[in-house]
Every structure is written in C-alpha cells, then in structure tokens.
Image (cartoon, rainbow, N blue to C red):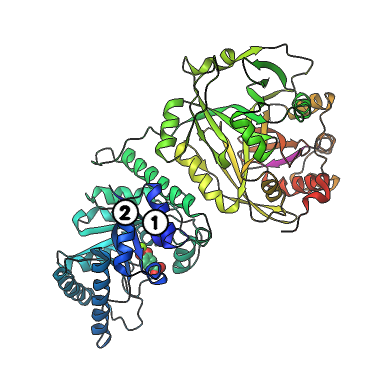
C-alpha cells in the first residue's frame, strides 16, 4: 500500500516540503493547488522536481464547484476543468479530486450530478485522466459519501470514481461501515485525517483542527478497516489542515505523519487479520510494566547536591558502575542512576541541558521487539560503544533527544544491575517508603505535544486521558496524561505556550523538551513525609489559604487537614478514590520531585492543585522566573 501526504499538511516552501516528505518515507504527494500557484515554477518543472525527490503525484486537488450548475455556469465549469487537465498533464498526474460544490447556484439532483460527471469522465478519458468525487462535509447538496457513491454509480464511467476522506465521513458521524458496501475499484483515492472532538462548525473544524491519525478522537482505524474490506489497494494519503502545523517544524511533522500512517495500518492489519495487505509486519505495541530506572546526568561539581537530595528522599546508594563514573541509588523498586562521565551521551546531555534526566529505562515484555517497533515507526535507534562487561541494552532516542532504554525479564537483560554494578554499603540513609515511579512528567513546547503523544501511543500500549488546562499565574500550560491500561506506566506531557510559565521557563533554561519532574509512589504518604523530614528533606511550602479551602471543598476532618498542612500535602478526589501529593523544592533550572499516594482507584494527577503548586514554586524561584516573553 502506497503512502502519500497533501502538500497543505506541512509548512515551508515546496522544495523544503518535498525533501521532508521524501525523507520521512512517503511514496507520493498530493499537490494542493494553492501550493502550486504560490510558487514560480511551471507545472512541468514542479512535476520534474517532485519526481527528482523520488516521489509520485497520485493526486491534484481540489477542483471546486463543478456539479449540477445551470447554464452558463455549467459550461464555464467544464472550461475550467479543461484548463486543470492541461496543468495536470504537464505536471504528470492523472487523478483530480473534485470536491462537492458549495456554489449558491448548484441545483443538486443525483441524476444531474451523474450526468455532469459522466461528461467530465468522457473528457478526462480522452487525455488518459481520471476524476475522483469527494463529499465535503459542508457541501451544498452532497455531503455524505453514500450519496457521492450513488452519483459515481449512476455516472457509470470507467474514468469516474469516488474519493473518501475520513474527516468528512467521521465528522458527520456517518457509520464508516457503510463503506464496506462500495466496490473497491470505484474508490480512486483515500485521504486520512483525525481531529479532536470539538463541537463546532464543520468547515472551521476541518480547516483548522485536523491532525494526524491517532492524534485526535475520530475512529480513523474503523474507517480504514472498512476501506480495506472493499479491496481498495490505492494510496492512503494524509490531508491535514491545522493551524499549529502551519507554524510547526516541517521535518518533524512529515515524520509524525508517516509514523501515524504506519501505526494506523498496523492497527488495521491486527483488527482485520482476514484481509490481505502488502504491509511490513511490526511487532505489536509494547506493554510497559513500569519504569526500570531514571538516569540523571550531572557534573562532579553538582553531584554532591543531587546525592544529598536523593538521600533526603530516602534513597540508598547501592552500586558503583564497574567501569564508569556512574552510581546506582535505590528505594523500593525505584532505581536512580547518577552519571558524571565526561564523555558519551550523558555528558553531551549535561552540556546542552545541565543536570537533569537524560535516560529512562522501561520494563517491557520484550526489549528487542519494543526497539524494533519503535524503529519501524521512525524512531532513531541509539547505540554507543560498550565498555567491558556492559550489556547491550536496546535503546532509542526519546522525547527531546533524551534516551529510552528497554529492559525485560529475559535471562540477558534481567542481570544488568548485578553485571554492571558492584554493590556498595547502603550508607546512612533511611528508606522512606517510596515503592515505584508513579509517573514521569515531560515538559515540551505546546506545539510538540501531539508529536510526543503519538510517539508514546504508537510505540506502547498506552491510552490518552483528556487534556487538562493547568493555570500558571503567567499563562496556561496544557497537560496530557498517557497511561497503560493498568496504570503501571504513566507519562504526563506538559505543553507550555509561553516562556513566562514555570514549564516554559524550564524549557527555555534546559534548551528543549525534557523531564521536569519524576513522581514516586508511597503507600503511606504521612509516614513517608515524616521519614523524609527526619532526613532533612525540605518540602515545597504550600500557602495556608489552600488548607482553609480544602477543608471546605471536601468536608475533611480538621485533624486530617492539619496533618496535611503540617507536611505540605495537597489533596484531591475523583469518583474512584483520593490522592495525596507533596513536592520537593525546585532544583537548578526547575527540576523537582513529587511524592504521591493513590487511594482506591484514583486515576488522575491532582490537576486542581497544580496552580497552587506552581505559585509556590515560583515564589521560591523568585524573580528569576518572571521572564519577559
Ligand atoms: O476544505 C476544503 O475546501 C477541502 C478541500 C479539499 C479536500 O479534499 C478537503 O477534504 C477539504
Ligand atoms: Mg479531502
């Protein structure tokens, strides 16, 4: 199955777009007319340039306001079509998309439309061209692919077929299974787009909010399953109109687009095993059962401060790497690796981002397969020379260029800790009852959130929670949680729109997306807080006003609230349970730790508390944080 993308889907001039599209692995480009008109080259030269990039032009689009017009408009529409045919022949493409008319004079009528398309098909056939009719969701008379199919059926011409676009079908909530009744050879082309569910005017929604399959809320997989069931074997092409993408990064968007298509077709293959498809087989999405380690990069100068913080959190230094300046800290199932090497990846990460998380190890069902799937989806494989005695652990580049390693319970990888580290005495620190990593919070530019959300949900078996808005005193931060079905692996993505927010400030100071905080789980947050206090841990001080409000909001016992206040613990509830959380003070560029206790089936992250946490952090970081944009 060939892949394509419409030139409207990514920003930049045509040459840059083509380069990115070819590099991302697409077979072709749909030429959107405006993209062609906007530049100076002749149609012939544009066609040559596209083919020079190794790309095909499976479609030229759109041709508007064609069908069911009264004279003299009808004759003029045919004249316009002939001129487009000239252009297509010069450029070297044989298929044009005719989208349903919005012309105020269009008369409608299935037979009238069929008659128009038959004549257009005749004219196209003379030149070896083909016509595809697409229903725009807001078309004047034709807004449903079933009506378009009826027009095509009655036109009964070999050069006339239909074009399906997932947005137009799904936005109108038309059951995609109705596609299964259409003969595959009469579907000339398929366009795909997803979109977030927002209740708004269809045209506005389509032109501004479409996104890549898997990034939105529409059932694009169900749509594509139905298309494949017809026997359709033509290209699948992305047609994404999106304001954010128009200002985004060309190469990254092209890569995301290709990733979304490969992931989608993999989903289709799994859901419809009886359908024949010429697709590369990928291992299935990896099941993450937890975070195996979090690695910090730092310098010799800053290490004592980081070590002291880890100690106050109740971590014990348990290992020294056999050949590198790398130490291992542990508490419960949580492993923290501290790397002060002066060469290799961790050091490069330190030089660009400063002290911070440079690597996350995930426990998966099969580490090699997880890496293979990630690479099949366009992720970059990572390897650096192995020192003596070191294991070859499958790795890729994760968010913001940091690393992601995959571990599993197999004989090889499960011995990494004993093979690569010599045990050292536990030292004086006292376990504070932290059991595991609850979640990892990554901060990114708002514009990159969809990209990271697709990265996680395409590679791992993770679902997306609804996006929540977090109010920072200086702007909005959008937060998107992704988690495995059993909640054992959780990531929150925080998208900063302005650098004046705490998240935005962190982003600017650490030069790019990265882990802003790591949250650890405790089964008894009061005991944990008390144990940490004994070891000199300094929590983030929360405003006393918070506790007045808390008592009123949840009807908690005064003594309970007083205990929370004493330990600076924040509280929340959802329909399934309750949640307690407290924070460390921000460190360096704003990196921090969080301790949480989930009671019952509480599934959130304490979003209602975020504004108070952020205000407290900003008070501590002081004027330094209040940057001008
Ligand atoms: O918004 C539009 O006008 C438009 C044009 C062509 C398409 O294929 C489409 O899906 C939408
Ligand atoms: Mg379309």
Q: Does the numbered disc 2 mark a residue whose Cβ is under 8 Å from ligand 1?
A: no
Q: Locate residue 519, reporting x and y percent.
A: 67, 34
**Rendered location of residue 253, percent (x, y):** 47, 52
Vertical side of 29 occupied by 427: above or below: above
- Give the secondary structure at mark 2: loop
First reached walking from the N terminus: tag 1 or tag 2: 1
Mark 1 and mark 2 in contact? Answer it, CB < 8 Å: yes
Q: Nearer the viewer, residue 331 or 530?
A: 331
Q: Quadrant of ligand 2?
A: bottom left
Residue 571 on the magenta segment:
yes
Quarter location, residue 77: bottom left
Q: Which numbered dot is residue 308?
A: none
Q: Residue at x 56, y 40 (%)?
A: 401
Q: Provide the secondary structure element on which disc 1 rests.
A: helix
Front in this rendered view, residue 48 or 322 = 48
Magenta residues (range): 568-573
């Amino acid at each position: 199955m060939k892949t394509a993308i419409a030139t409207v889907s990514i920003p930049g001039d045509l040459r840059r777009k083509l380069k990115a599209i070819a590099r991302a692995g697409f077979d072709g480009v749909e030429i959107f007319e405006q993209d062609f008109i906007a530049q100076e080259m002749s149609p012939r030269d544009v066609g040559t340039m596209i083919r020079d990039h190794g790309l095909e032009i499976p479609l030229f689009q759109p041709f508007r306001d064609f069908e069911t017009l009264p004279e003299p408009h009808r004759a003029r529409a045919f004249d316009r079509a002939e001129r487009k045919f000239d252009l297509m022949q010069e450029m070297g493409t044989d298929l044009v998309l005719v989208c349903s008319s919005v012309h105020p004079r269009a008369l409608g009528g299935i037979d009238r439309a069929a008659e128009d398309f038959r004549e257009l098909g005749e004219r196209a056939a003379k030149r070896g061209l083909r016509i595809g009719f697409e229903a725009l969701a807001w078309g004047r008379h034709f807004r449903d692919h079933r009506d378009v199919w009826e027009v095509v059926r009655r036109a009964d011409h070999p050069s006339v077929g239909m074009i399906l676009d997932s947005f137009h079908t799904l936005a109108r909530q038309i059951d995609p299974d109705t596609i299964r009744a259409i003969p595959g050879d009469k579907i000339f082309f398929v366009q795909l787009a997803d979109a977030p569910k927002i209740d708004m005017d269809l045209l506005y929604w389509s032109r501004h909010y479409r996104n890549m399959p898997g990034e939105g809320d529409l059932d694009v997989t169900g749509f594509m399953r139905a298309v494949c069931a017809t026997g359709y074997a033509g290209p699948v092409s992305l047609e994404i109109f999106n304001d954010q993408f128009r200002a985004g990064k060309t190469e990254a968007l092209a890569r995301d687009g290709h990733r979304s298509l490969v992931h989608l077709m993999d989903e289709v293959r799994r859901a419809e095993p009886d359908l024949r498809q010429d697709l590369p087989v990928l291992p299935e999405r990896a099941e993450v059962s937890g975070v195996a380690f979090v690695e910090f990069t730092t310098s010799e100068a800053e290490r004592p401060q980081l070590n002291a913080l880890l100690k106050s959190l109740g971590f014990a230094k348990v290992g020294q790497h056999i050949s590198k300046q790398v130490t291992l800290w542990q508490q419960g199932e949580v492993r923290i690796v501290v790397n002060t090497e002066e060469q290799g990846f961790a050091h490069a990460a330190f030089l660009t981002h400063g002290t911070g998380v440079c690597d996350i190890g995930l426990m998966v069902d099969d580490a090699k397969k997880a890496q293979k799937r990630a690479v099949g989806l366009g992720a970059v494989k990572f390897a650096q020379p192995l020192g003596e005695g070191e294991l070859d652990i499958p790795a890729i580049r994760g968010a913001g260029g940091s690393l992601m390693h995959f571990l599993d319970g197999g004989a090889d990888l499960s011995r990494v800790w004993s093979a690569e580290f010599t045990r050292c005495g536990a030292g004086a620190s006292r376990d504070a009852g932290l059991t595991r990593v609850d979640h990892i919070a990554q901060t990114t530019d708002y514009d990159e959130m969809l990209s990271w959300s697709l990265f996680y949900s395409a590679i791992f078996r993770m679902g997306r929670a609804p996006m929540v808005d977090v109010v920072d005193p200086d702007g909005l931060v959008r937060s998107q949680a992704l988690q495995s079905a059993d909640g054992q692996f959780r990531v929150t993505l925080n998208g900063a729109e302005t650098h004046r927010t705490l998240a935005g400030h962190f982003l600017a100071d650490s030069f790019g997306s990265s882990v802003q905080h790591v949250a650890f789980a405790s089964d008894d947050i009061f005991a944990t807080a008390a144990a940490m206090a004994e070891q000199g841990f300094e929590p983030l001080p929360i405003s006393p006003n918070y506790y007045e409000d808390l008592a009123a909001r949840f009807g908690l016992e005064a003594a309970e609230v007083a205990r929370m206040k004493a330990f600076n613990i924040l509280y929340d509830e959802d329909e399934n349970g309750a949640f307690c959380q407290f924070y460390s003070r921000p460190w360096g560029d704003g990196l921090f730790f969080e301790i949480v206790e989930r009671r019952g089936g509480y599934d959130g992250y304490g979003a209602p508390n975020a504004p108070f946490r952020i205000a407290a952090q900003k008070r501590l970081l002081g004027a330094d944080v209040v940057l001008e944009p």
